[in-house]
Amino acid sequence: MDYLGRQRSLQNELSKHRLDAFLITHLANIRYLCGFTGSAGVLLVSEDKSIFFSDGRYASQARAEVQAGRIVIQRKPPLLLAAEWLRSRFSRLSVGIEAEHLTVAGQRRLKDCLSSSFRLRLAPPVVEQARMIKDREEIEHIRKAVLLGSKLFTHLLGTIRPGMTELEAAAELESAAYRAGAPAMSFPTIIASGERSSLPHGRASNQAIPQRGFVVCDFGVILDGYCSDMTRTISVGHPTLEARRVYQAVREAQQAATDAVQAGRTVGEIDGVARKSLEKNKLGKYFSHSTGHGVGLEIHEAPHLAAGQKEVLRPGMVITIEPGVYLAGKFGVRIEDMVVVNERGCEVLTSASKDLIAL
Ligand code: ZN
Ligand code: ZN
């Protein structure tokens, strides 16, 4: 990964935001900028240098992973360490902090340590903006994670049976993921069967999968730090006419939105395409969430594909397309793929079939 290039781009942004330095505290942003994969660290980027701070537990890991100008390790919280480092070298400075990530308590600790001539400024999410566009190496990692996701779905189809609990089905899927070398799932696996399929975020429960009805399966793995995310809805037993009609409508909406993805269009437009397609089938009001989100080092990242969002699609963005319909007390359907935006449109990364599969 081109960590130094990423740090250089951030350094070029500093003056634009009238900052002397940027204090990065969000771990995914730290990993993106310097390669550190541990759980405690702070990265300080100024116009001419970058310094990584961590505590004693990460001394050898930091030396092995971190690509930054300097690594400072001491037995104290990294945020305090960074503040003391600044205080000992500068008398006044405008320091950007990550408004979305640094807690109120963290800000207070910084203020207490730094003198009043240091200005802490809430910086816009510039690292998140940079992370939206994946480079070739990142796309390869994501491609592998998505491919494993599709393989796990095939494994799930071979193991899921009515009568087993949703948690048992999730356990089958997750243990296959670990055996395949994924150190973690992207998020707690969703296996939502029967009426529970109408819960857009129905985490696997102790409920037994009924003899008939839909099962929404939404899951992903992390490989080399990059997440995958996919959803398929399968039918146990023969689906009713209404169930088939709703499934077909969601599939059409998912296809229409995918076909609409193109560099230059806004994410709000793509959301609108999915919504309009469901409205055409009188199902628009049952589509209760946004159409998709960016995926990368984090499972949910920019851009957010929702109504009114003005972010413009650019080549290298990796997003999900995941419309759904949820009929409370009856059933729900969601279909989700990951795609990478390119010059011509997009490449669908998720290879699992979207035909309605009946067990
Ligand atoms: Zn998902
Ligand atoms: Zn998703």
Image (tube, grey):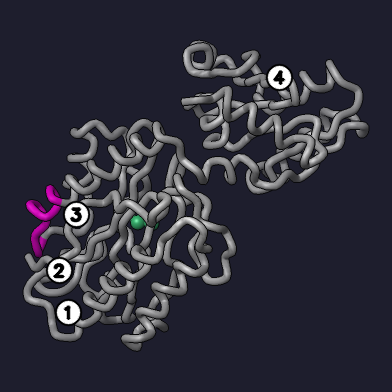
Magenta stretch: helix, strand or loop mostly: helix
Marking on residue 284: none
| Vertical placement of residue 242 versus 171, above or below | below
| Residue 7 position by quadrant | top right
Q: Closer to the observer: label 3 or label 1?
A: 3
Q: Closer to the observer: label 1 or label 4?
A: 4
Name the N-terminal-most of marks 4 and 3: 4
Name the N-terminal-most of marks 3 and 1: 1
| Residue 252 position by quadrant | bottom left
| Residue located beneath label 1 in the image | 244
Tell me where the magenta segment starts and ends, as one range: 154-163
Question: Is ligand 2 within 8 Å of the beta carbon of the residue shown at mark 4?
Answer: no
Please say if the residues under marks 1 and 2 sit with CB atoms less than 8 Å apart. yes
Amino acid residing under circle 3: Ala
Of 130 and 214, nearer the camera is: 130
Marking on residue 356: 2
| Residue located beneath label 4 in the image | 49
Amino acid residing under circle 2: Leu
Of 333 and 15, nearer the camera is: 15
